[in-house]
Amino acid sequence: MLSLALDDHRRLRLFEERDAAELYALVAANREFLARWMPWAQGQTQENTLEFIRSGRRQLADNQGLQTAIVQDSAIVGSIGYHRIDWDHRSTSIGYWLGESAQGHGTVTRAAWALVDHALSVWKLNRVEIQAGVGNDRSRAVALRLGFTEEGVLRQIERVGERFVDHTVFSMLAQDWPASPSGSGAHVPGAVGSPAPRS
Ligand SMILES: CC(C)(COP(=O)(O)OP(=O)(O)OC[C@H]1O[C@@H](n2cnc3c(N)ncnc32)[C@H](O)[C@@H]1OP(=O)(O)O)[C@@H](O)C(=O)NCCC(=O)NCCS
């Protein structure tokens, strides 16, 4: 099973079906918080949560990326993963969320660093994208902290509840990625259980 230590207390690991109840409880406890920017959160059920976990396992089996639990001291506090991989164009995008009380400790910045590094250094992709809702300043800050370049705005690209939300597109290219993991504390070592890069 892929498990990646971010530090002594925090790690990323693949979801297991038995995580569905805990993950759903986290979503339910943070529903209003998450639903401000994530359209799936408002209607999420435990059944949907189990299907998310299963689809993430299919995604991994299909060599299309992976979804991980962000775990702090054995409790799931959020999730981060790749939406999909475009192997032809060597490109992917990542998405993330935390429970509200887990914010403010650099957890997602560190986790996203690890996934970006894995995509560019292990899978040898060329581009990683982050889209942040315009006005989602915390998500925007994650991309900027990682050194992503702001490219522009996709207008009304997503419907969140009753509103259409603009997204700012940020990207990191392989040529611009500071490949050394020094200082980050996070590195994906060969990622046991993760798909191989395609030539
Ligand atoms: C987007 C989201 C994950 C960002 O969470 P976050 O806690 O701000 O991000 P991080 O975990 O990287 O933590 C950064 C914060 O920790 C602080 N921090 C502490 N130690 C840090 C470290 N070593 N490295 C980086 N930041 C650190 C930063 O200063 C920052 O706090 P500040 O904003 O008060 O200055 C969170 O707000 C969220 O889940 N929102 C709802 C869902 C959502 O919008 N998802 C994104 C959709 S595009």
Image (tube, rainbow, N blue to C red):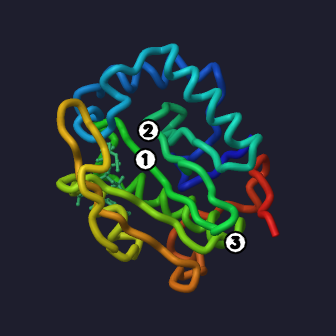
Counting residues from the start of the chain, the first of labels 1 and 3 encountered is: 1
Looking at the rendered structure, the secondary structure element under dot 2 is: strand
Q: Are marks 2 and 1 in contact (CB under 8 Å)?
A: yes
Q: Amino acid at mark 3?
A: Lys
Residues tagged 1 and 3 counted as in contact (Cβ below 8 A): no
Could you tell me residue 183's position as x and y percent? 51, 75
> Which residue position is annotated with label 3?
124
Where disc 3 sits, the SS reads: loop
Name the residue: 56% across, 85% down: 175
In the picture of the structure, the residue carrying the numbered disc 2 is 78
Q: Is residue 177 left or right of residue 191?
A: left
Is the CB of the residue bearing disc 2 within 8 angstroms of ligand 1? yes
- Count of labels in the image: 3
Q: Nearer the viewer, mark 3 or mark 2?
A: 3
| 8 sits left or right of 155 in the view | right
Residue 149 picture location, percent across and down: 37, 76
Residue, x 62% and y 42% (percent of image)?
A: 13
User: Which quadrant is home to the C terminus?
Assistant: bottom right
User: On the image, numbered disc 1 is attached to which residue?
Assistant: 96
Percent position (x, y) of residue 185? 54, 66
